[in-house]
Amino acid sequence: MAGGTHVKKLLLRVLDGDAGVPPPIWLMRQAGRFLPEYRAVRTQAGSFLDLCYTPELAATVTLQPVERFGMDAAILFSDILVIPDALGQSVRFVEGEGPVLEPVRDVQALAQLTTARVESHLAPVMETVRLVRRDLSDDVTLIGFAGAPWTVATYMVEGSSSRDYAQVKGWAFGDPEGFERLVSLLVEATTIYLCAQIEAGAEVVQLFDSWASVLPEDQFRRWVIKPTREIVAGVRARHPTIPIIGFPRGAGLLYEAYVAETGVNGVGLDSQVPVAWAAGALQGKVAVQGNLDPIFLLRGGEGMRQAARNILTALGSGPLIFNLGHGVLPATPPDHVAELIALVRETGVRETGVRETGARETTVRATGAGRG
Ligand code: CP3
């Protein structure tokens, strides 16, 4: 085990390939509408994008779940759609409806977009990162993030959330050279953005590819794996040791190729991924993150406890970051989150009889994960 391991934060050690006992836990969308204190700040901010671009308020809502529940990580409060906004596309969030963008559907429309202003436009987000790092306790990790190019492109091309992805898939399948120009623009902007987050204090970054599930194999390789690999390489060129988590939601059997070919240190599993399969096929290569179905958290009770234990049993002896398979749903009772965290933190207690600092500092070298 590397020297100084005992001082490194638990979540970072797991991304190095250690098994944390108990595993670190955070939840996708842990800051959001299920928390009354979020709704209060959200009202104060006005629009959702105003909240993302007001550092004091964005830092406050980033810290809220950590203060209430004591997660092992805070995730920067922002959105994946700040990138199209920074590129010059019109982006709005309509109450009760979700994002609305002026669609970009061909190469001509790309002329209005530029990466030149990404850093200056997103400077408030970096200020949020600095404020959070200043206020975060020493054992909590700050996760920065961005949308992966494919998922961000779905919103840019469809102009909103979509049912069938007909426009974006039509462009990608029918005019791959043209669509490649949009994806290249996103690779460049995302690399700039993630590097800036790291320079401001993010200790891990996650790429959300929420709509990776809608592409057939060859298209998945071209529009999910390839741009992700380029971003990972671009970020590592400037920050060689930064841990990167990829979340290709719904990738199915293609999770293996994603892990083998992108260079990520950790992979987010959606709830459908069989945990026993992930233990054998993925966890020997990278840390895994997930994958409780958000509905179990919403409903709570014995169902939630059993589902969480299944994950801990299958994946808990290797590098695991406990999380959901997708974001916290707005109707989730906060008490259920507190109960889930308590349950995860009991992991290893009964087996070893150790608790307290002893248990939290016990790590077992489990894999060759973590090439950083
Ligand atoms: O996880 C966190 O707590 C950090 C903040 C965060 C948000 N969005 C805040 C948010 C993160 C990491 C995201 C990522 C994001 N945004 C994704 C990828 C993850 C996923 O859920 O699949 C996607 C696809 C988006 C795009 C997006 N943002 C949509 C489609 C919507 C509208 C739907 C909805 O849930 O309302 C948003 C809005 C959004 N982003 C909200 C929050 C808290 C709710 C807006 C509000 O408070 O009015």
Image: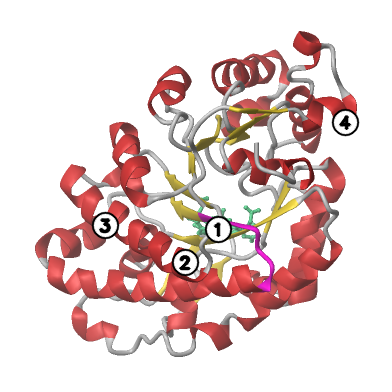
Q: Which of marks 3 and 1 is in front?
A: 1
Q: Nearer the viewer, mark 4 or mark 3?
A: 4
| Quarter occupied by the N terminus | top right
Q: Quadrant of residue 341?
A: top right
Q: How far apart are marks 1 and 4 (CA)?
A: 27 Å
Q: Tags 2 and 4 in contact by the CB under 8 Å rule? A: no
Q: Who comes first in sequence, dot 1 or dot 4?
A: 1
Establish if 285 lies above or below 301: below
Tag 4 secondary structure:
helix
Q: Who comes first in sequence, dot 3 or dot 2?
A: 3
Q: Tags 1 and 4 in contact by the CB under 8 Å rule? A: no
- Which residues lie in the magenta part? 200-206
At label 2, which amino acid type do we have?
A: Val
Tag 2 secondary structure:
helix
Given residues 67 and 257, the one toward you in this image is 257
Q: How crowded is mark 1: few (under 14 residues within 10 Å), some or many (20 or more)?
A: some
